[in-house]
Amino acid sequence: MVRDPARRRCFGPEIWFAGVAMHLAMLAAFLYAPQDVSGEAQRIFYFHVPSAWVAFLAFFVTVIASIAVLAKRSMWWDSLAVSSAEIGTLFCTMALVSGSIWGKAAWNVWWVWDARLTTTFIVWLIYASYAVLRMNTPSAERSARFAAVYAIVGFASVPLTFLAIRLWRTQHPPAVVMGGDGGGLEPKMLHALLFCVGAFTVLFVAFLRGRFRLEQLRRATQ
Amino acid sequence: MSWLSAVLCLAVKDVRHELRTREALASMFVFSLLVIVLFHFGFSDLGAGATAFAPGALWVTFTFSAMIGLSRSFAVEELNGCLRGLLLCPHDRSVVFAGKMLGATASIAAVSTVALVLFVILFNLPVLSQLWLLWLVMLLGVVGIASVGTVFSAMTTGTRMRQTLLPVLVLPVILPLVVFGMQVTARIIDSTPGGGIGGGMLGMVLFDVILTTVGMLTFEHVVVE
Amino acid sequence: MSDAVRHAIEAKNLTRRFGRHVALCDLTLAVGEGRCTVLFGPNGAGKTTLIKVLSTLAVPTEGTALVCGADVRTQAVEVRRLVGVLSHESFLYESMTAAENLRFCARMHGVRISREEIDALLDSVGMLAKPGGPASAAGSVGTMSRGMTQRVALARCLLHDPKVILLDEPYSGLDPDGAEILTRQIHKLRESGRTMLITTHQLSVGLEVADDVAILSRGRLCYRADRNEVRTGDFRQEYARAVAGATV
């Protein structure tokens, strides 16, 4: 049970740090990074790629936590798993939406079925199914166990999804090739991208801590 | 009693139950026919004919009739706590997983075989010489779907909305298998020279091996409290 | 174990919790070989959880449980060989007959059993194997009454000749006739020297068959006594106290 009143606040100093990092990231994306040949719309890239990165990172954290749930039968790890999954769903949605906007702005298509974007979509579906599974399992203990198994099995299938679509794409060459598909990035663009990835990671950690504390409080008060 | 004989005993029990009650077999079969009819009317305007939509239609049939079969696989164990009865046998839990998976594979493969043959006939697909290869690809797919489906079917017996929840859980996970399967099927139907199906089939085998292993390892955590 | 009385069931500091819900709390209980212990307790006391842990259907969070010396965690398969469970769930497949159910269960347990032996077993639990008899076993289980399925379930439980029998609320859903038949079966099993642990919340029936009695409340063992030391009136008071404590 939470005794220290100061600790009842879910978001701590890390959220301020994340705020600063995100502001700097915006500066990096809009001012530091040079304009790309395809136009200003390309700058969504500095938002889209880090979002996708965090979505996959969050999935990874969920899977590690899920393995711990099964090994230790611990609810602490389950709180971490569900928090990470929720934050991951959020960033995954952001990745998909930003990818779609970028596609429309730069190449006039709302969606491209390339390997990376499609895999991100499948990850989103797995996140959504995870949430639906949790919602429909009434017992807290079963919910923790089942969701953990689902996350692990889902994680095992994602790399195979990427491979399958890659293979599909080599046989159905796309009409539009999304930028950054392996082409070299200018050094300044790379710096900006890496900085944004770092800032988004800090934001993820801040959100995760807050959500985790919220989950712990919720369980303690039930 | 060895691991293998226990697995076979369980699988045979399931197959016998299916043959006796014919609940799942009938629904799966009727469903397959409906898909065939729908796809015919949906795509009959395509000048290219059935070869264009055949891979997609076939795999939709295999996948969704598998959902019906899998849902029933653990429904029979739910009544009277039979699953717990199985778990009380002096074997490793993987016996229950492998037995249910094998039983489900047998039922689904049986129906899918009939669906495949009907499809080839009704749509005049020029693949009779390659039918065995198509059947093999179908089998690889069914094995993968059954492995994932067995774990999730065991889960959904404890939840509300059992029948609608199972496809929601299974489909995103088996997607790579279905994509590989459709590719290979398309190449076989198109009779593309030089094969080129090696990569796809390897992908399917890889999926089956990985997901069956993961399924076997995690199954215990689903059924044991 | 070179102790004078070998314990068939030994639970030491057994705890089972997940999150805030504690099903068993620091439970220490021993059942001597050949003894019949009856465990009473209100709903939610943890009786079913204890049976599940002892039969390896559930994993304990802390503590140990041994069945005839085999640890439920590390020697689970061995424990399952030694234990037979009779629950309010029959573990029987409704589309199969009693004989088919028994044959399947025997195969899964690695027990070779002939047709005659199955018939004999069904007879011994009070079910006439021939069709048309008062308790016919020829039809599928789905058509049988609760009392009949309970008897087949008992036969199923005894197929692999278990040393320890766990009965979880075996009287639930039985009419007086069925209950009487079950009590007779339990007496027979006691005479055969098997160890039994029965959970129930029916006091009179439980006291009738018990060698030892115990009360479980909210996952804790709050009373333990030899049957001879117990007077029914006092026991009812103890039980009422335990139930009252549980609802507080």
Image: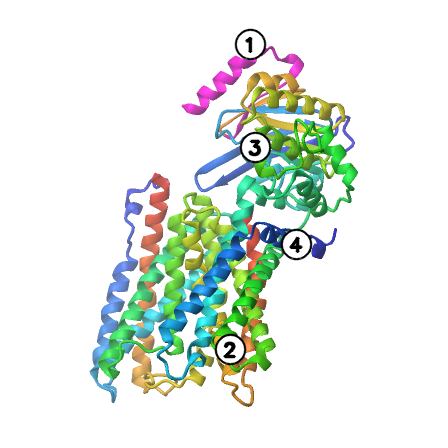
Where is residue C198 shown, x and y percent of the image?
62, 27
Is C181 displayed left or right of C121 in the figure?
A: left
Image marks 4 and 1: residues in contact by CB distance under 8 Å: no
Is C181 rendered above or below residue A121? above
Amino acid type shown at disc 1: Gly
**Looking at the image, is mark 2 or mark 1 nearer the viewer?**
2
Amino acid type shown at disc 4: Val
Helix, strand or loop at label 3? It is: loop
Residue under the image location 77 percent in, 26 percent down: C4
Q: Mark 3 packing: few (<14 Cα in 10 Å), some, or many (20+)?
A: some
Question: Mark on residue C88?
Answer: 3
Give me the chain letter of mark 1: C
Measured in 3D between alpha carbons, the distance from the residue under mark 4 to the one under mark 2, in whole angstroms, is 30 Å
Can you see residue C16? yes
Is A74 rendered above or below residue C210? below
Q: Which residue is mark 1?
A: C233
Measured in 3D between alpha carbons, the distance from the residue under mark 4 to the one under mark 1, in whole angstroms, is 54 Å
Question: Mark on residue A144?
Answer: none
Measured in 3D between alpha carbons, the distance from the residue under mark 3 to the one under mark 2, in whole angstroms, is 50 Å
Span highlighted in magenta in the image: C219-248
Is A3 rendered above or below residue A194? above
Is A172 rendered above or below residue B166? below
